[in-house]
Image (spheres, rainbow, N blue to C red):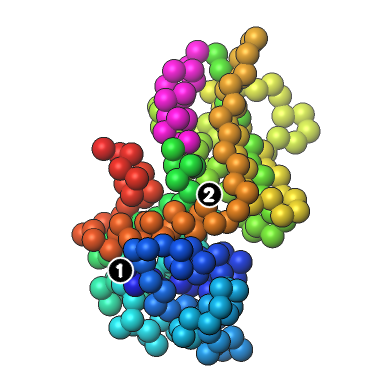
Amino acid sequence: MTRVAIVGVAGRMGRTLVSAVEQDTGATLAGGIVEPGSSLAGADIGELAGVGKRGVKAVDSLSAIVDDFDVLIDFTAPQVTLANLAFCAEHGKRIVIGTTGMSDDELAQLDAYRGKVAMVFAPNMSVGVNLTLKLLETAAKALGDEGYDIEIIESHHRHKVDAPSGTAIKMGEVVADSLGRTLKEHGVFERVGQCGPRTDKEIGFATVRAGDIVGEHTVMFATEGERIEITHKASSRMTFAKGAVRAARWVADQENGRYDMQDVLALNE
């Protein structure tokens, strides 16, 4: 059994992760972290998640449970994640990271730990999304340089703080890499006013933030006379949580390195 600890256990995603661990036959709930000084420290994690008392108390620091867990799951904020990554590297723990919105500098800091800790880092832990990425790679190679315009549309709930979503960026990177392009050169993230006609090689992004949308992504390949759309829609955070727990079980047996969900699902083989 993989002993799993969860950061941000009192949040929406944290509570869903607790439920996902409870449903997984190969993982056990070993701890949960709340913000330093939080009044929820000492509360039963199962009760916080609505699954009933589990006898595991929330704590406000990783050092309090350092001997209790094997893998940490972190879906928080960039600087919090980087601090937790350093802790795991120092103490020989594994980590699964679903945090999005990292800057180039923060991504470089994360990558510097690839030889010091076993980590799974992915903008989206959904099995369906990662299968979709493989479909996009195939579609881009077949269509992208044959007069097809590429647009990526993503929708999320009103509380999401970063845009475009990490998943949308990853989809754009997969398409761009397949076509020998880069998002830095060809990504278009804003169209306002007299922006001129579309260029042939640009990859456009559009963002929606509204209500309680869990996550929807569509990549459009459009040309004269036809349009192909590859879409993934998530109706529950549980799809991400189950993928994260699957990643935690997988990474528990891996050597130090930076992995993604393509590795977890053996899609890179």
Q: Is residue 124 above or below residue 135?
A: below
- The three-letter code of the residue at mark 1 reads Met
Do the numbered discs 1 and 2 sit on residues whose CB atoms are within 8 Å?
Answer: no
Q: Is residue 137 above or below residue 251?
A: above
- The three-letter code of the residue at mark 2 reads Gly
Q: Is residue 262 above or below residue 230?
A: below
Q: Is residue 139 magenta?
A: yes
**Who's the residue at 37% across and 63% down the image?**
25
Between 93 and 46, the residue placed more toward the observer is 46
Local packing at callout 1 (Cα closer than 10 Å; few below 14, some 14-19, many 20+) is few
**Who's the residue at 49% across and 42% down the image?**
129
**Who's the residue at 38% across and 56% down the image?**
246
Chief SS of the magenta region: helix
Between 170 and 214, the residue placed more toward the observer is 214
Q: Earlier in the sequence, mark 1 or mark 2?
A: 1
Q: Which image quadrant for residue 174?
A: top left
Estimate the x, y position of residue 8 in percent, counting from the top left.
53, 73
Local packing at callout 2 (Cα closer than 10 Å; few below 14, some 14-19, many 20+) is some
Estimate the x, y position of residue 234 in percent, counting from the top left.
59, 46
- Tag 2 residue: 166
Q: Which residues are magenta?
A: 132-146
Q: From mark 1 to mark 2, how far is it between C-alphas?
A: 30 Å
Secondary-structure class at tag 1: loop
Q: Is residue 40 above or below residue 146?
A: below
Estimate the x, y position of residue 269 in percent, counting from the top left.
26, 37
